[in-house]
Image (cartoon, rainbow, N blue to C red):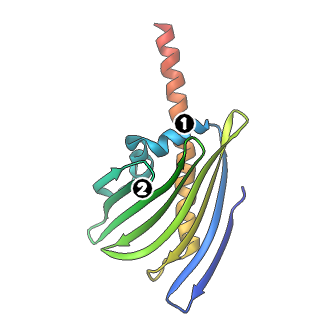
Amino acid sequence: MNDRQQETETEGLARTGAFHIARAVDARVETLFEIVSEPDLFRDWQLGESAFECLEFGHDFRPGGISFFRTRVGPDVEVRCTATISRIVPNKRVEQSCRFELNGRLAWSHSATLSFTPLGAGARIDYVEEAVMIAEGETIARRRDTSEHFINQLGFMAIDLERRRRTATSDARAI
């Protein structure tokens, strides 16, 4: 595991920082990229087993495209995430800028790069983010923890997707 983090405070108004998360997974880069690029798989990755009520979702996976979701977290909190995809290198890299709003107010924004590299029979995931935290109580450490969860979920989802596909292929051969 190679995780790095840096955080600074800017005149007491916002905190800025950057971090890097690296993971090795037993799944191919093509499967990881498919999850990131295909709307239904992307939605499952981002919102799949959450307790959030999804109010709105879209995933226009192309340079200049917008991915977004709006969820309700309990009775009093609405979250909106809007990401603009700036660069895509198929099966290798996705670059985006993103903003998160809580109840209509900007909480933080970030730019991020998600990269996939073949590693033996699997892949290495690298996630690098630079963030500006606006909302009180939001920190780079908390943002990193959330990102670690999503990167881990991406790996688990890819492994499970490949396992299910192998099982389906084996079952089809047996018939």
Front residue (pair 19, 26):
19
- Could you tell me residue 80's position as x and y percent? 34, 65
The amino acid type of the residue labelled 2 equals Gly
Front residue (pair 111, 21):
111
Query: Residue drawn 31% across and 53% down?
Result: 57
The amino acid type of the residue labelled 1 equals Thr
Quarter of the view holding residue 129:
bottom right
Residue positioned most to the top = 175
- Could you tell me residue 109's position as x and y percent? 47, 71
- Could you tell me residue 14's position as x and y percent? 51, 84
Which residue does the numbered mark 1 point to in the structure image? Answer: 31
Compared to residue 104, the image places residue 37 above or below, namely above
Residue positioned most to the bottom = 11
The residues bearing labels 1 and 2 have C-alpha atoms spaced at a distance of: 23 Å
Closest to the camera, between mark 1 and mark 2, is 2
Residue 55 placement, left or right of 127: left
Task: Determine the secondary structure under disc 1.
Answer: helix
